[in-house]
Image (tube, coloured by chain):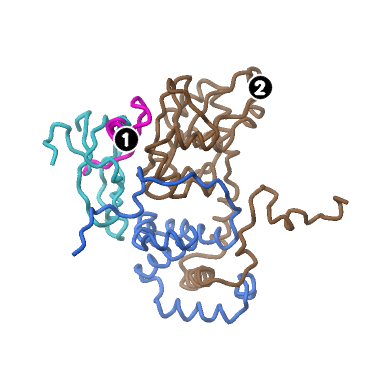
């Protein structure tokens, strides 16, 4: 009786996106949640910001996702002139496509047949969030931050990517004002695909370097 | 006597660590609000993301291990706003008590919640 | 700025963006990135001077020695000018 369980995902504790709901969504009010409410109310009462500005920022962040980056990558695959512009200035190329990336300083690093790029932030959790949305949880962990710079190949194997010794790995530690996106290698067999079809091949992890695009 | 090499806890690159945990979660509304407060505070010039990071680092490794990402963020946002004189510790503490009295869950503790 | 640079091996106790594992290591400037306000002042709410920022490329062998997974692999990081010195400066 599958139709008897419209609330199936909730019962499983898993959201439609496949991630578990955080258990504090409906739990007892915590100290830190009280602090968030208090800080927000005081900022509004002191005239520092309005509820509309806060809601607009949440909406802006919610509208950003790996889909945006996938569209940029797909255009670079399909359009050689755009690819040149992306590698010269990834911020301007992203804006050219209409993405509101705010003050993001973005550098695109391209994978080749001989080179694989990987992005990390060892000091905190810098991520091209104004293009790709908020980072996955693993990107912010001690394990990823510690190991990606000294044993990137072992880390990539944990993500299912076993690179041959003949491939050069280039790790990029986002230590200051730049953010990075990997321009993955266009998959073989994708010739003749439209930009939209190409974009569907581009995964979030392929733009961080912990994965490859889907095969057509 | 105790000596120290000067390496700060958050500076993790190259340290030994276990397998990368792959599980993730969808962000709760209160977490999205913390993120938005940080960004809007930055746009208003109240403090910078560098100030956020400095406060996070100064909270120490125990906080990193014990509290979630956005729990640490709201603490760091608050630290910077206190330092900037936007409100006082007494105002904050009084308000947090009022909020606790509104109801037992996050939704019920909103003003007009 | 020289093409080959060394990250200064200093250990200030506050907010800095030059990672520990690169201090004292030598690399090549990959590209200049322009000038940015110094995060070491911004972090404390201070007026911040602009500093030149460089993307520096290190070989994994330089950073990790024999422990490197693959000697031809590289690591790029952004380092501010006041954390860089010419390679020929005598190492401390």
Read off the chain for label 2: A
> In this rendering, does residue A24 appear at all?
yes
Label 2: few (<14), some (14–19) or many (≥20) C-alpha neighbours in 10 Å: few
The percent position of residue C17, horizontal first and vertical second, equals: 31, 48
Q: Nearer the viewer, residue A126 or A115?
A: A115
Chain A, chosen colour in render: brown
Number of the label disc, if any, that sits on residue A96: none
Chain C, chosen colour in render: cyan
Residue under circle 2?
A193
Report the residue at 20% width, 59% height from top.
B3
- Magenta region: C61-82
For residue A197, what is the image quadrant?
Answer: top right
The percent position of residue C3, horizontal first and vertical second, equals: 22, 28
Report the residue at 56% width, 50% height from top.
A61
Report the residue at 62% width, 68% height from top.
A27
The percent position of residue B41, horizontal first and vertical second, equals: 44, 60
Q: Helix, strand, or loop for circle 1?
A: strand
Residue C90 shown left or right of residue B23 in the figure = left
Q: In the picture shown, does residue A193 fall above or below C54?
A: above
Where the C terminus of chain A falls, by quadrant?
Answer: top right
Chain B, chosen colour in render: blue
Residue C68 shown left or right of residue A86 in the figure = left
Label 1: few (<14), some (14–19) or many (≥20) C-alpha neighbours in 10 Å: many
Q: Helix, strand, or loop for circle 2?
A: loop
For residue C72, what is the image quadrant?
Answer: top left
Number of the label disc, if any, that sits on residue C55: 1
């Amino acid at each position: 009786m599958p139709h008897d369980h419209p609330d199936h995902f909730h019962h499983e504790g898993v959201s439609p996106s496949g991630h578990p709901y955080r258990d504090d969504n409906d739990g007892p009010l915590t100290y830190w949640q009280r602090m968030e409410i208090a800080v927000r109310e005081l900022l509004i009462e002191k005239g520092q910001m309005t509820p509309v500005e806060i809601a607009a920022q949440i909406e802006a962040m919610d509208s950003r996702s790996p889909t945006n980056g996938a569209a940029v990558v797909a255009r670079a695959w399909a359009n050689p002139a755009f690819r040149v512009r992306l590698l010269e200035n990834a911020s301007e190329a992203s804006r050219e496509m209409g993405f509101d990336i705010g003050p993001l300083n973005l550098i695109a690093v391209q994978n080749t047949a001989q080179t694989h790029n990987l992005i990390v932030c060892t000091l905190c959790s810098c991520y091209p969030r104004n293009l790709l949305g908020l980072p996955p949880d693993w990107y912010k962990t001690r394990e990823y931050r510690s190991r990606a710079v000294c044993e990137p190949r072992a880390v990539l194997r944990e993500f299912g990517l076993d690179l041959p010794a003949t491939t050069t790995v280039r790790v990029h530690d986002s230590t200051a004002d730049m953010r990075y996106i990997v321009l993955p290698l266009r998959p073989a067999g994708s010739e003749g695909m439209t930009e939209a079809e190409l974009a569907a091949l581009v995964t979030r992890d392929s733009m961080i370097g912990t994965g490859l695009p889907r095969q057509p | 006597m105790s000596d120290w090499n000067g390496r700060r806890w958050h500076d993790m690159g190259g340290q030994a660590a276990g397998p990368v945990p792959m599980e993730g979660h969808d962000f709760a509304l209160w977490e999205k609000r913390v993120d938005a407060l940080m960004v809007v505070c930055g746009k208003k010039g109240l403090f910078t993301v560098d100030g956020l990071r400095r406060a996070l680092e100064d909270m120490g490794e125990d906080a990193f291990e014990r509290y979630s990402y956005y729990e640490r963020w709201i603490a760091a946002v608050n630290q910077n706003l206190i330092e900037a004189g936007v409100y006082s510790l007494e105002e904050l503490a009084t308000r947090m008590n009022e909020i606790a009295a509104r109801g037992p869950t996050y939704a019920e503790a909103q003003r007009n919640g | 700025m020289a093409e080959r640079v060394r990250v200064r091996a200093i250990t200030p106790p506050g907010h800095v963006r030059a990672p520990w594992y690169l201090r004292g290591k030598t690399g090549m400037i990959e590209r200049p990135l322009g000038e940015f306000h110094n995060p070491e002042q911004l972090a404390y709410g201070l007026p911040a001077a602009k500093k030149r920022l460089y993307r520096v490329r290190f070989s994994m062998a330089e950073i990790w020695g024999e422990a490197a997974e693959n000697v031809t692999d590289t690591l790029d990081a952004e380092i501010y000018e006041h954390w860089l010195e010419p390679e020929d400066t005598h190492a401390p």
